[in-house]
Amino acid sequence: MLGEHRYALRSRWTGNRGTGTSGYRDYDRSVTISIDGKPDLAASSDRPFRGDGAKWNPEDLLLAALSECHLLSYLHACVQAGVVVVSYDDEATGVMTEDGRGGGAFTEVTLHPRVVVAAASMIAAAEAAHAQAHEWCFIANSVNFPVRHDAVVTALPG
């Protein structure tokens, strides 16, 4: 089914300490991200940018979006290929490089999925499903840096 899908959310800065942005060190980087019908997400900038390390930051959210999109696309690819996935864990990593002018960009992300399938006979198809998942992932198709996959697929004993 082809179609256009629209998304909306609210980002509200909650870090005014009373003097607004009167100075670089005078405000907190706290943000609340809200979507109707979902729990609010407490966010901030990353710790090196004077943020709260206990809160989600934009870099975390981008990495999470890439990891989850691949996971969901992969599960669909496996269903299409007749592969029964019994567990999937990913420890995604990303590299963001500052440009020295106050900005920067991600230069790469690597997903490290660890997949367990129901039978050893499914391993080859499960490995191939990562390429299909990458083609289907809306988020990976929206970024201008490589999203790599270092996948390991094993089977349940038996």
Image (tube, rainbow, N blue to C red):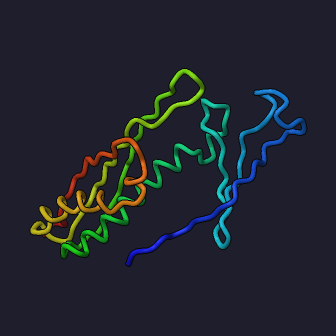
Residue 55 to residue 35: above or below: above
Asked whether, in this view, residue 51 is left or right of residue 14, the answer is: left
Image quadrant containing the N terminus: bottom left
Q: Is residue 86 above or below residue 141?
A: below
Rendered location of residue 88, percent (x, y): 32, 61
Q: Which residue is drawn at 66% across and 37% down?
A: 51
Residue drawn 22% across the image and 63% down it = 129
Q: In the displayed image of the protein, which residue is found farthest to the left?
A: 121
The image quarter in which residue 116 lies = bottom left
Q: Give the farthest residue toward the right.
A: 18
In the rendered image, the vertical position of residue 101 relative to residue 17, given as above or below: above
Pinpoint residue 2: horizontal percent, then vertical percent: 39, 75
Q: Residue furthest bottom?
A: 1
Residue at (65% x, 57% y) in the render: 41
User: Quadrant where the C terminus lies?
Assistant: bottom left
Residue 144 horizontal side relative to residue 117, left or right: right
In the foreground, 107 or 110: 107
